[in-house]
Amino acid sequence: MSNLLTGSGARRVSEAEVYSVNEPEFTKTWHPVSHNKVLTALENAVKAADIAVRDKQYSLNQDGLNMFGVWNLDIQHNGMNWAMGIRNSLNKKFAVGVCAGSHVMVCDNLAFTGQFVEFRKHTGSLDMAELNQLAIRAINGVTKKMHLFIEWHAQLKEFPLNETAFKVLTFESMKRHVFAPSKFTKFLECYHDENDQTKHSESLYAFHGAVTRLMREQSLFQVQRDSDRLNKIIDDYIDIHPEEAHKAGFWKSLKDKLAVFSF
């Protein structure tokens, strides 16, 4: 998403560091809710939904005012763990939000829809009680998106990728800054590994997995941003190959599926 940080100066941090960021003073119209309160509200929401969290990862920008987190949930589907992206800003960069995603266990890589359920802007009336209720509604909403994203991701296994298409998608990924040309050799290694480890070799699934492998060492701000760009490239490719999409069982692209829901 264009309104997220590009990752410059962002770093992976512990949960304790996230909780230690102070809440700025607020005005009548702007009430910045601390990362601590947001995470507490979401903890309450996942417990209310009877969802267990396996592990957590966080990134903060340089001054700690913008936070992105990933909670890997104790829910698996076709070899993929559900993951939830969380963001919060204390400097009016963006609203509090959560997004859907997956953690692919065989490759240990992350992928996101890049589309947030933005459940609250930092306005003056926001308090902890309201935040708890909003978090519950957001978790309910994001699980719907999670189902759609998992379905979309799984369908990539049935979408073949010949050599010409592979070259086009690779070029587009570098052109649109999903990964740098300097990582081309590493990308090829990841792609070969994907083809060796999956029964769905030479497919969009293998391509998607190879690109997301490259994101392992990035800040979570960058992972979310680059996942969004990658998914857009793949959706564009699917849209211009309707015959292959029909064979693979795609009835809609990811962006169209997600547009079905409004929150």
Image (tube, grey):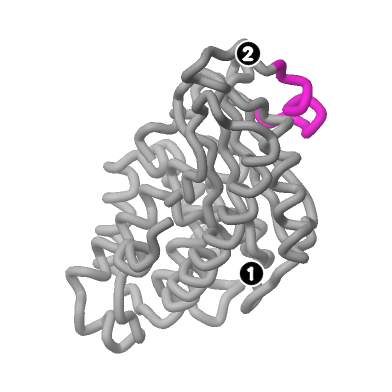
Farthest bottom residue in view: 247
Read off the residue under disc 1.
80
Tell me the amino acid under the disc marked 2: Pro
Name the foreground residue: 186 vs 240: 240
Read off the residue under disc 2.
24
The quarter of the image holding the C terminus is bottom left
The residue sitting at 57% across, 25% down in the picture is: 66
Q: Does the segment drawn in magenta span residue 255?
A: no
Question: Is there a contact, CB below 8 Å, between mark 1 and mark 2?
Answer: no
Other-residue count near label 1 (Cα within 10 Å), few / some / many at <14 / 14–19 / ≥20: many
173 vs 226, left or right, is left
The residue sitting at 58% across, 31% down in the picture is: 126
Per the rendered image, the range of residues in magenta is 11-22
Residue 214: x %, y % from top left: 53, 47
Q: Secondary structure at mark 2?
A: loop
Q: Does the segment drawn in magenta span residue 21?
A: yes
Residue 141: x %, y % from top left: 53, 60
The residue sitting at 33% across, 80% down in the picture is: 250
Determine whether 216 is above or below 154 in the image.
above
Residue 88: x %, y % from top left: 57, 32
